[in-house]
Image: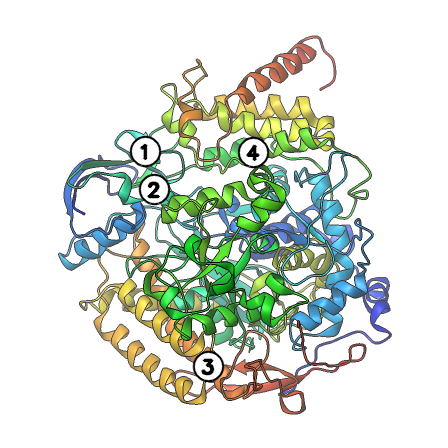
Amino acid sequence: MKFHLKVWRQKDPKSPGRLEDYEADNIPADASFLEMLDIVNAGLTGKNIEPIQFESDCREGICGNCSLTINGVPHGPGRGTTCQLYMRKFRDGDTITIEPFRADPFPVQRDLVVNRAAFDRIIQAGGFISERSGSAPDANSVPIPKTTADEAMDAAACIGCGACAAACPNGSAMLFVSAKVAHLGLLPQGKPEKDRRVLGMVRQMDQEGFGNCSNYYACEAVCPANVPAAFIARMNREFTAASAKEMAGLPV
Amino acid sequence: MTLDSKIPAGPLERKWTDYKNNAKLVSPANKRKFELIVVGSGLAGASAAATLAEQGYKVKCFCYQDSPRRAHSIAAQGGINAAKNYQNDGDSVYRLFYDTIKGGDFRSREANVHRLAEVSVDIIDQCVAQGVPFAREYGGLLANRSFGGAQVSRTFYARGQTGQQLLLGAYSGLSHQIALGAVKMFPRTEMLDLVLVDGHAKGIVVRDLNTGEITSHAGDAVLLCTGGYGNVFYLSTNARGCNVSATYRAHKRGALFANPCFTQIHPTCIPVGGDYQSKLTLMSESLRNDGRIWVPKRKEDCGKDPSSIPEADRDYFLERKYPSYGNLAPRDISSRSAKEACDEGRGVGPGGLGVYLDFAEAIGRLGRKTIEERYGNLFEMYENITGENAYERPMRIYPAVHYTMGGLWVDYNLMSNIPGLHVLGEANFSDHGANRLGASALMQGLADGYFVIPYTLGGYLTTQFGKKTDPSHPAFESTVREVKSRVQSLLDIKGTRTVDHFHRTLGLIMWDYCGMARSREGLTGAIEKIQKLRAEFWSDLRLLGGSAGINMELERAGRVADFLEFGELMCLDALVRDESCGGHFRTEHQTPEGEALRNDQDFSFVSAWKYEGEGKTPTLVKEPLAYEQVKLSTRSYK
């Protein structure tokens, strides 16, 4: 197959970037999108043009490293990460525009590489259960209904890629944050810190510069892990309850 | 040089308990004086960094990914073993221990493996307390399944994403400690060398992958948790970034590399599609619980639609050859059987390199809904990659490199022969022998990080009171200088061929001669080919850009340069180990039925290799394997 690419090139975080035109020739239909870029990069190297810098690691849809916006959609057409997008999904001769994930809190480092440390800082603000290695009771001492465990798993499936924030017109990270709040808040082990967690994480999210949710559901549409937007409503309830307690001077 | 494995005296089942009772402790007041360097943030690294920080040590943790949550442990699918015996089906610490020793084809250390089986039960408790959403029964208790070669159901799992959930658990613990200021995290920072001060590991040299800056960090001990080296084969199930550099650099500084040829080839991967391919995708082995593996009996049927081939013309070769284990035979045996079938010309799919994994019978027995519940995400992944629907047509699978049992040599304390240098998880060699059982990698990574190193590190640190390393010691500056000059020398080659070209070529050599079947002749030839390829690399590599800022080709070039040396060491190890055992199959040593023929008389030892300098043959140091508890037997899964 053959494609015409428009690729975002940017030297470093401070330099301005722009779209450059490249041709992708002789691309097997069974190649993944990232393998197509590997082929293009080998060609560029031959022509003494520095290869396009993009992140990827596991190439099986779970690490959340890739951060490409393809034709305006984070991770591109279909549901899944870019590494799981295959060229047979495109038409021969298509023009494909490739940019990095766009969200203010994700500064571009170079070309298609962005810095998503903001997500790590949100987790550090409460996305954990405080426990010490070695202090846990027997794993079966607290039964957890299967339905609860399954729902927690639906939320825990988030791969932290940031597509939700990149897709949102408000640059909101609420799907990411609510997934962690729901995962831990649903489980009995996570209940003791429920209020502290949601307050800490939401405040950190605001501080990082992510926007608010206004129910576009673009996040849900691009989420490669199928995290449902219903978790956002759940987080809002938890946040309201915890804020009310805090305002009433109750311990959280 | 002799190796002291420092195995505690006493009966096997008392060793770890007695060790803990008598281990040297570091008091809370002293813990905060020690600064530890942890390289890698996968299961072993994240669990070690979090646990040691909880205990009061100051920790610096490094990873090459943009977040510690992305380490490749995240991709493990199937599950984690633990001798909980929740199913009341006869499991016990002893049975898990014995299965691991036997599965490893009697090439691992008894005491280490027994300890692993003992702490396995604590890992599950720990993970549940962290909020890992393991699969549960309707009554609310934990669910288990039987997994790859086990006759008991001891595997805990979280859908097909167990590695992800365990890693996110460890990452959340790590994040908590980062928030408390107990861990300082350095993402997108790659270790490029080890710093030795008076023969002790006292620091590392790293490159900031965003800025390109090369600096050093001093610490009181260094913990390498940098995973395995499967990417020496270019195509493997490892992530693109997985590499041998941290452990190989340590090896060049004097750390012995043990059993480098012990590689695991995983039987259930999606077959290679073409030469554009950048990685192989694993389909969890749990699929073998319900899928039946077969190829056509006759070569002529290979091109036919599988549904048109009647039962009588199908060869369910694992069920035929290993009636008691059937499709659940251990990984090495299953992989080799698939290769044999394909070598006989009975493989299916492109290039005849594939066998069927068929769910028709299971769907008939359990219904499509149950199969969807168990493996839905795997079926989706398969369809996405191949464009085929596995509910209707059998999957095609083929073995691929998945895990490396070899690694840096460590003693019972997880310390290498370099004082202060500790090695955890897949990066060390100690627990899996010549073949790892399914669902045991996650167990070992977390065992080392949560429950072993917190006890064993004290043994070294208590000898280091008052010996604070001076970061201005000349060793730091000189190591930084060496690393900078090496990076520059890669950029200075200015040849014509890309990093990937050399990596792919090396991978093919390794797969052909040091993969599923190895021979004296093949390995000898491979060593020459690698030497030649290495010379070409250093004269014809084309690398654009500079050392400042992000330059991923430069990152890869450094890793491939190490693989080009390490591949030779692997072949040498495979050549010297003139027997077949576990995943190491020497064609000269097989039974008339084609099974691996071990030679306990001459090869019941760990091969530990000492680096002797550029272009010199490394020296082999042997650690004899003494079996006190287990009687060596021929592995039979018939």
Residue at left offset 60%, top offset 25%: A200
Camera-side residue of B526 and A105: B526
Mark 1 burial class by Cα count in 10 Å: few <14, some 14-19, many 20+: some
Q: Is mark 2 on a helix, strand or loop?
A: loop
* Residue for badge 1: A77
Tag 1 near tag 2, CB within 8 Å: yes
Camera-side residue of B24 and B392: B392
Residue B334 falls in which quadrant of the image? Answer: bottom right
* Circle nearer the viewer, 4 or 3: 3
Mark 2 burial class by Cα count in 10 Å: few <14, some 14-19, many 20+: many
* Residue for badge 2: A85
Q: Is mark 1 on a helix, strand or loop?
A: loop
- Furthest residue toward top: A248
* Residue for badge 3: B518
Quarter holding the C terminus of chain B?
A: bottom right
The reply to whether label 1 and label 4 mark residues of one chain is yes
The reply to whether label 1 and label 2 mark residues of one chain is yes
Q: How far apart are marks 1 and 3 (CA)?
A: 44 Å
* Circle nearer the viewer, 4 or 2: 2
Q: Distance between the residues labelled 4 and 2?
A: 28 Å
Vertical arrangement, residue B416 with respect to residue B525, above or below: above
Q: How far apart are marks 1 and 4 (CA)?
A: 29 Å
The tag earlier along the polypeptide, 1 or 2, is 1
Mark 3 burial class by Cα count in 10 Å: few <14, some 14-19, many 20+: many
Q: Distance between the residues labelled 1 and 2?
A: 8 Å
- Amino acid found under the numbered disc labelled 2: Leu
Q: How far apart are marks 3 and 2 (CA)?
A: 36 Å
- Amino acid found under the numbered disc labelled 1: Pro
Vertical arrangement, residue A63 with respect to residue B573, above or below: above
* Residue for badge 4: A123
